[in-house]
Image (cartoon, rainbow, N blue to C red):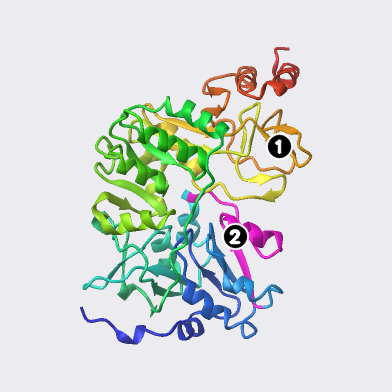
Amino acid sequence: MELDRSKFVTPEVAAERAVRSGDWVDYGFGGGYPELMDRALAARKGRLTDVKIRGGLVIRPRIEVVECDPEQISFHYYSWHLGDYERKLQARGLVQFLPMILRSLPCLYRDRHIRCDAAFVPVSLPDDQGYCGLGISNYAWRTIFQSARTVVFEINERLPRLQGVDGSHRVHLSEADYIVEGEHEPLPLRTYRDPSPTDLRIAQLVAQEIPDGAVLSLGVGSVPFAVASMLADSDIKDLGCHTGTISDAFLRLFQKGKLTNSRKEVDRGYATWNLAMGSQELYDWLDREPGLFRPSDVDYVHSPERIGQMSNVISINGGVELDLMGQENAESAGARQLSGIGGQLDFLEGAFRSKGGKGFICLNSTHQKKDGTLKSNIVPCIPAGSVVSAPRTMIQYMATEYGVVNLTGLSLLERAQAMASIAHPSFREELLRYAGEHFGTR
């Protein structure tokens, strides 16, 4: 189709026209990343002041606007969710964290609680009608760029080209103010360490709780991946996918014939997701078989109401520590931010609403301190300064290598006793003593 060719400009021209001093610029979330625009904006260091960039869960090796300006003369970087690389930047004082629940993010832009002056949106190669896919990061892009003053589409030739069911994952070139092209680096890959014997024991306990036809939401980390591997090698049938991030765990289930999506009451026959993060093989799968997927934005994927319309939703996430009331810290070590809450609360609530659904928080019962001693990850109370990511009213199932407990409907004393029962044996007496002193009958 005929397009306005004047919209096609170099990244340098787009950066010059789109960004002014004092602006807020959105880079997006996850593996989709506007690397050409990032480089072009970084080249304007010294000619701009107080430009604030939002991103999150970045797994690339560099963010040029940050690395080129450690004195923060021109640029300040903010993250919704710290990835591995952003944690390193945080240690250097180069990133500021923005707390949020992922499902609420579109409302912040739509209702103008926050502003976006320039949106740098990575898109796939267009088809002959001018439609592009949103690659591996649907995020909340449509809501964001509809609220933005200036929209730049960065065509990345390496992104999967799927556009989703009924256009759930597509945009049109006419929606951009500027369009940039160029050669890109290979897509960033996300790998995870091999599961430890403790991780495998937790995964085994959780896998036993998953029925045929379950709809899986898997967080990142070794335990969810181990659960998927066990299910792939089991006799289970007809699993579904409705998840924030689709990963190689789902690819393995598909390869073993376990992921059919045939029993889902919502998006039957499709794997539903918002982000994709994993190996090149995963990205090739998305590109090769687009008819298997319904990628969509966070308003759709993370809606607890929609998740609750499906039966047997199983949400599996990790945590840092839990206390005897069931409060969970999933994202900090004291006041030091480690990651973010992301969609964990969305899927915990969705699993609560689901008939037969179960929301699991999985963690090793202990971790080893620098001096070699063990510290319990089940604690009497979340220590001062640490984050309470999920309230006690939202935690349903808790799993360690010592067992699985369901906290639903239990009193404070009963919850504490249940938590202590799956703590490391060396800490159970101390935890039960605290429970008796603080939650016992008066």
Residue 293 versus residue 117 in the image, above or below: above
Name the image quarter holding residue 56: bottom right
Tell me residue 230's x, y (percent). 41, 33
Q: Closer to the camera, 272 or 31?
A: 31
Q: Is residue 14 left or right of residue 89?
A: left
Tell me residue 346's x, y (percent). 47, 42
Q: Residue at x 34, y 68 (%)?
A: 124
CA distance for labels 2 and 1? 24 Å
Question: Please, what secondary structure does the residue beneath circle 2 have?
Answer: helix
Tell me residue 82's x, y (percent). 59, 55
Q: Closer to the camera, 114 or 96?
A: 96
Q: Which residues are magenta?
A: 74-102
Q: Residue at x 59, y 31 (%)?
A: 392
Res 406 seen here: no
The residue carrying mark 1 is: 368
The residue carrying mark 2 is: 85
Res 295 seen here: yes
Kind of residue sitting beneath label 1: Gln
For disc 2, the neighbor class at 10 Å (few under 14, some 14 to 19, many from 20) is some
Q: Is residue 237 left or right of residue 119?
A: left
